[in-house]
Image (spheres, grey):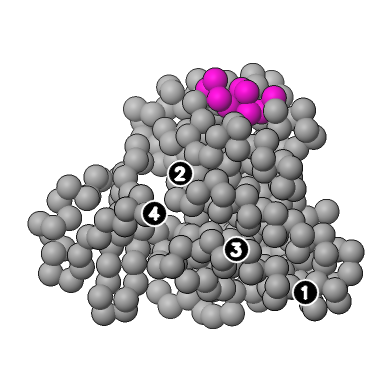
Amino acid sequence: MTELLVTPKTVEHIETLIEKGADAFIIGEQKFGLRLAGEFNQAAMKKAVELIHKNGKKAYAAVNGIFHNYHLNALESYINFLHEINVDRIIFGDPAVVMYVKQQKHPIPLHWDAETLVTNYFQCNYWGEKGAARAQLARELSLEEIINIKAHANVEIEVQIHGMTCMFQSKRMLLGNYFTFQERQMKIERNQEANELLLYDEERDNKYPVYEDYNGTHIMSPNDICLIEELDPLLEAGIDALKIDGVLHTEEYINVCTEQYREAIDLYLEDPEAYEDEKFMLVDPIEAIQPEHRPFDEGFLYKQTVY
């Protein structure tokens, strides 16, 4: 059964998303995880895991940050904590996480998420041999590449189907110096309604959300991936998990997306022809609340990445 994976903002939000049909949740704190929709300290993590398990769902802890030597003691303690509260999986990108997990008496299965690096099935299977049960594929892959990886992978495969993606990350806090170095080509615009900072590219008329947190500066895509009308080849290929990334979106937005994608997945599994007939209407409630400056696209599903 394909899993619908979502990114909640609070413990209370998890309750709503369970009602909307989510199967699994990515939670964590920015000290250890990258670009989280919500911040969960250890008390919130414990409460969230209890709630998720009580409802028969899965809790995945994001530990996919970029770690230096001075992070390692805190990282080891955090891995111990995650085993104490019994999360279902740990998301990682750094081998240090693998080493600390392997020290546990009963290691929690891992999900490999190294962002743009997850691009072939040999990588997925390599980390599978190191303890990973799943790989989240790079967002820059075409449908053909995704299906090929799934056909040859020995681990579960996860694909992002909705939300924005990260285009650039620097561990430096760049916004304070932005005008000093980049005022020639772009302007910074404060969008009060969306409560976010936008980089405005006048030449392409694109607006890129940008924000800073513990991990540095993040510049996000100007469009949102929306694959609710393109789920059939992914489901037919047996993709194990479909992810809605709610970073920088509201709870209401994540709720509507979860509800619509739940309906789409269930409809396809029940009757693929019915999904084919109705999928164009399933996007309407999402379009109704989509931020005006963020058009939809299909990511790189039907186009080749140019590096």
Judge from the rendering whether residue 38 lies leftward or rightward of residue 180; answer left or right.
right
Answer with left or right where residue 66 lies relative to residue 64. Answer: left
Is-magenta flag for residue 46?
yes
Are the two marked residues, 1 and 3, in contact with CB atoms closer than 8 angstroms? no
**Between marks 4 and 3, how big is the CA–CA gap?**
16 Å
Q: Nearer the viewer, mark 2 or mark 4?
A: 4
Which amino acid type corresponds to the residue marked 4 in the rendered image? Ala
Query: In the image, what residue occupies the spot 82% across and 59% down?
Result: 266
Q: Which residue lies under the disc numbered 3?
A: 286
The span shown in magenta is: 42-50
Closest to the camera, between mark 3 and mark 2, is 3
- The mark nearer the N terminus, 1 or 3, is 1
Q: Earlier in the sequence, mark 3 or mark 2?
A: 2
CA gap between label 2 and label 1 equals 35 Å
Q: Earlier in the sequence, mark 4 or mark 1?
A: 4
Real-space CA distance between mark 2 and mark 4, rounded to the nearest whole angstrom: 21 Å
Number of other residues with Cα within 10 Å of mark 3, as a class: few under 14, some 14 to 19, many 20 or more: many
- Residue 97 seen: no
**Residue contact at pointers 2 and 4, CB within 8 angstroms:** no
Q: Residue at coordinates 80% horizontally, 34% vertically from top-left?
A: 56
- Residue placed under numbered mark 1 in the picture: 278
User: Does dot 3 land on a helix, a strand or a loop?
Assistant: helix
Which mark is on residue 34?
2
**For residue 300, which quarter of the picture?**
bottom right
Q: How many C-alpha atoms fall within 10 Å of the one at disc 4: few (<14), some, or many (≥20)?
A: some
31 relative position to 299: left or right: left
Can see residue 303?
yes
| Residue type indicated by callout 3 | Ile
Quarter containing the C terminus: bottom left
What residue did someone put label 4 on? 194
